[in-house]
Amino acid sequence: MSRIDASGTQKVSRYVLVGCLFALGIWMLRRFVPALCWAAVLAIATSSLYDRWLSRFRGRHRHVWAAATFTSLIAIVLLVPLAYGAALAVGEAVSLVGAFIDSAHSGPPPLPEWILQLPHVGAWLQTLWDELFNSPGAGVARGAISHARPVIAFTRVVGLQVARRIVTLAFTLLTLFFVFLNRDRLREEGSIALDRLFGRAVERMLYHVAAAIRATVDGVVLVAVGEGAIMGAVYALAGAPHPVLFGAVTGIFAMVPFAAPIVFAFVSLLLAFQGSLGAAITVAVACTFVVFVADHFVRPTIIGGAARLPFLWVLLGILGGIESFGLLGIFLGPALMAALVSIWHGWTSELSHD
C-alpha cells in the first residue's frame, strides 16, 4: 500500500514539476511568444504549399534547402510590401512637412469650390480653415514647429515600435525555418506527447484547430488581398493619389471585420476635397459593393465550409482575438473557437451514445 501511495505521490510531483518548468519556460520566453505563435500560424497555413515545394528537391540535404528557400520566399512576400509602404510613407511625411512649412509663409491651401458653395456652411468652413493655419495659438505649421520636442519624442516611440516589429519578424522567420526543417519530427513527437497527456480524442480537436487556421488564412488574408487589389484598381480609375498604397492599406484593414470602409471613406473624402465629387461617389459606391459581397458571401463560404464552424463564431473569434492578442488574434481567435466547438461536439456525441 505504501508503494502505491509513493508511486501516486511521485506521479503528482512529477506533473507539478513539469508544469512549473513549462510555466517558467514560457515566462522566460514571453518576449518571443508572439514570434513563435506567428511561426506556428504560418507553418500551418502554408503546409500544403510546402509539401509541393519539398517534392521539387532531391538529395541528402533536401529538407535544408527546401526550408531555407521556402522561408526566404515568405520573407520576400512579407518584406517587399512593407518596404514599399514605408518608402511611400516617408516620402509623404516629407512632402507634408514641406507643405506645412510653406503654408506658414504663403498661407493655407484653398478649399475646393464645391465646399465654398455649400449654403450656410461654406463660409463657416472657410473661417475655420483660415483660423486653423493663421491663428497664433492654433496654427498647424507654427504649432508643429514650436512643439518640435514632442514630435521628436513621438518619432522615437514610433521608431522603437518599428524596431521591435522588425525583431519579431526576424525571429518569426528564423523559427519558421526550423519548424519546416524539423516538421516531421515535431509532428510525430507532438502527437505522442499529446496522446500520453490527453488521449487520442485530442487529435480530432487539433485537426479542427489546424483547419480553422487554414480557413482563416484563406478567408481573411486572401479575401483581404483580393479586396485590396480590386479597390486599388478602383482608386486608380477614379484618379485617387497613390492608389497602390491605399489599396495595400485597404487590404490590411480588410483583415479586420468592418474596418475596410474606414480607408475607402478616407479616399472618398480626399477625392471630394480635391474637387472630384463624382469620383468620390463612385469610389464609395463601388467599394461598398465589394465589401458587402466579400463579407456576406465569399468570406463566410470559405471559412465556414473549410473549418466547419458557423461564421458567427468565426466573427466573434476574430473580434475577440484582436481585442485580446492584437493582429495575431485574427488567427488564434477562430482556432480557439474551433477547439471549443470540437470539444462541445465531442461531449454531446458521447452523451447521445450513452
Image (cartoon, rainbow, N blue to C red):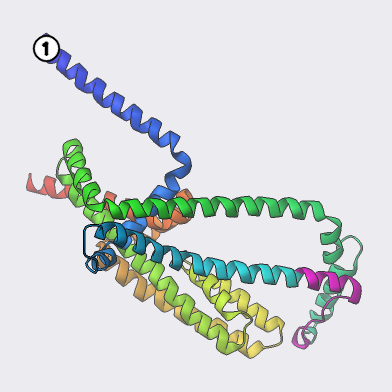
Q: Is residue 6 visible?
A: yes
Residue receiving disc 1: 3
Q: Quadrant of the N terminus?
A: top left
Does dot 1 land on a helix, a strand or a loop?
Answer: helix
Q: Is residue 111 left or right of residue 17?
A: right
As for residue 101 lying within the magenta part, the answer is yes
* Prevailing SS of the magenta stretch: helix
As for residue 122 lying within the magenta part, the answer is no
The stretch in magenta equals 97-115
Task: Work out whether residue 12 or residue 275 is closer to the camera in this orientation and state it.
Answer: 12
Q: Is residue 88 left or right of residue 135?
A: left
From the top left corner, tell me how far across and down residue 113 is, in percent. Answer: 78, 88
320 is higher (above) or lower (below) than 28: below
Instruction: Farthest residue to the front: give it.
Output: 60
Q: Is residue 337 left or right of residue 95?
A: left
- Residue at 11% x, 49% y is 352
